[in-house]
Image: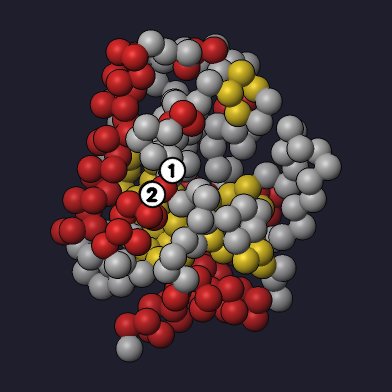
Amino acid sequence: MSEEAWRIVGTPRFGGILVVADHASDRVPADIDLGIDPALLHNHIAVDLGVAGVGERMAAQPGIAAFLGNVSRLVCDFNREEHAPGVVPIASDGHAVPGNALDHAGHEARLARFFRPYHDALARQLDEAPPLLILSLHSFTPHLASKPEEQRPWQCGVLYNEDDTASRLAIALLREEGLTVGDQEPYSGRLLNATMNRHAEADGRPYFGIEIRQDLLATEAMQAEWAARLHKVCNRIAIAIGG
């Protein structure tokens, strides 16, 4: 099932696991000109590289579905508050996005076309088939162009805001896998957690957010490895929190 702003892979089930990937696509609709070098659409500023492949593979397993963003985060960043400046970014990691210098009407049209349908559909999906666990899936770049001095050694990071129940379990389980796991790294979920704040924390739905370093998702084999790993971790968390 798909719409312009989102798509669902797999069959959502009551008491199952729902993977949510806000930044799963680099797609820019033909009628939108961002005014950037097209090569940047294959950069982390446009898409969370590798997460679509991980989410799709996880959704091939029984009891798991994936709700995936269907346009580039440069068109509309779903993991922002509606009135945040970055929801339609005019710059990202040192790159200007001149096509997003919109007037009020243009900005409102972008929200009405992408942001609101995405979040309305996600809310509807969660109400119709409440999952036992939500996995918020992202990837991060090993090096920010705007902060070359910043080291990002973690293979993955677990993010959360107020509810850390599932996150604490996830951190322990991922470390059991021999991974270098960031706790609120490469940045804090208390600062950047808009989708989960709205759809999980606000309604008491168990979740955890994971950021995977994008160079570890560069091939289909790597994506399959992470999908299998997260499938196992999510199932163990779901059993633990489900009693």
Left or right of 51, for residue 214: right
How many numbered markers are drawn?
A: 2
Callouts 2 and 1 close, C-beta under 8 Å: yes
Q: Residue 79: give its label.
A: 1
Residue 163 lies, with reference to residue 6, above or below; the image says: below
Q: Residue at point 79% right, 50% down?
A: 151
Residue 19 lies, with reference to residue 166, above or below; the image says: above
SS for tag 1? loop
**Residue highlighted by disc 2:** 195
- Figure quadrant of the C terminus: bottom left
Q: Amino acid at mark 2?
A: Thr
| Residue 15 x, y percent position in the rendering | 26, 73
Disc 2 packing (10 Å; few <14; some 14–19; many ≥20): some
Residue 9 seen anywhere in this rendered image of the structure: no
Q: Residue at point 41% right, 85% down?
A: 240
Q: Amino acid at mark 1?
A: Asn
- Figure quadrant of the N terminus: top left
Residue 21 lies, with reference to residue 76, above or below; the image says: below
Residue 194 lies, with reference to residue 103, above or below; the image says: below
SS for tag 2? helix
Q: State the separation of the CA atoms marked 2 and 1.
A: 5 Å
User: Hey, which quadrant is residue 136 in on the image?
Assistant: bottom left
| Residue 144 x, y percent position in the rendering | 72, 38
Q: Residue at point 68% right, 44% down?
A: 141
